[in-house]
Image: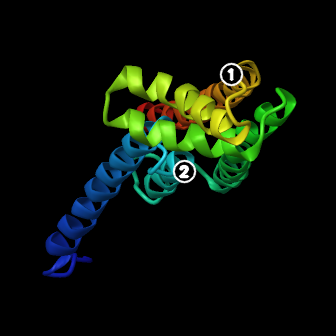
Amino acid sequence: RWKPPANSERVFKRFYRMDIALVIAAVILLVAGFLGTFLPVIPGTPLAWLGLLAANFSSYSHIGIWPLIITGIVAAAVTILDNVFPAIFTKRSGGSKAATIGSTIGLIAGIFVGPLGIIAGPFIGAFIGELIYTNGQAEKSLKSAWGAFLGFLFGTGLKMITVLAFICIFVWKIVE
């Protein structure tokens, strides 16, 4: 009769702890990814994808190579688009790069004010940036600020939808 090695229980416990650690890491990365959808200093979509990758190596949720490749491509595309949308929307509204930079500065400053600051900060920052650039042309600055703000909202919404989809994939694979 075959008997398991004497240290097999220790090895099993080590793998069990690693599984739990991978699931915990996946949850932390997915939550950090969600926070990163509206906090500019955290790369939300890539962190959420890393959460899926960590979950894949756990025996609790095997996601598979093709879903990981597809979600990785989506994460990269969304990250690129998030950086491009504010510039596109600002340009379409007749704004300059100063409005885009002001929008980013306004978002960072708005974080310290709270949820209202996160929403209003990009608009106010873009308005001030464009106002300085155009030497006080308020109407043009307002139009540019609105474009930069819409670009910010569009990029943030796209990131949020993507990360929520990643979270749904994770939960689905855990429950499955």
In the orientation shown, which residue stands out farthest toward the front?
135
Q: Nearer the viewer, mark 1 or mark 2?
A: 1
- The amino acid pointed to by label 2 is Trp
- The amino acid pointed to by label 1 is Ala
Front in this rendered view, residue 143 or 176: 143
| Image point (67%, 26%), residue name | 145
Front in this rendered view, residue 33 or 133: 133
Q: Is residue 46 above or below residue 175?
A: below
* Residue 128 position within the rendered picture, expressed as x and y whole percent measured from the top left: 58, 33
Circles 1 and 2: CB atoms closer than 8 Å: no
The 10 Å Cα crowd at callout 1, few under 14, some 14 to 19, many 20 or more, is: some
| Image point (33%, 54%), residue name | 25
Q: Is residue 69 left or right of residue 113?
A: right
Q: Is residue 38 above or below residue 59?
A: above
Is residue 148 visible in the rendered structure shown here? yes
Residue receiving disc 2: 49
| Image point (21%, 76%), residue name | 3
Q: Which mark is residue 61?
A: none
Number of numbered tags placed on the structure image: 2
Q: Quadrant of the N terminus?
A: bottom left
| Image point (82%, 26%), residue name | 93
Determine whether the residue tagged by mark 2 lies in a helix, strand or loop: helix
Q: Is residue 83 above or below residue 162?
A: below
Determine whether the residue tagged by mark 1 lies in a helix, strand or loop: helix
Q: Is residue 140 left or right of residue 131?
A: right
Using the numbered discs, state the Cα–Cα distance from disc 1 to disc 2 in whole angstroms: 42 Å
Residue receiving disc 1: 138
Is residue 165 visible in the rendered structure shown here? no
Front in this rendered view, residue 158 or 60: 158
Q: Is residue 26 left or right of residue 170?
A: left
- The part of the image, by quadrant, that contains residue 95 is top right
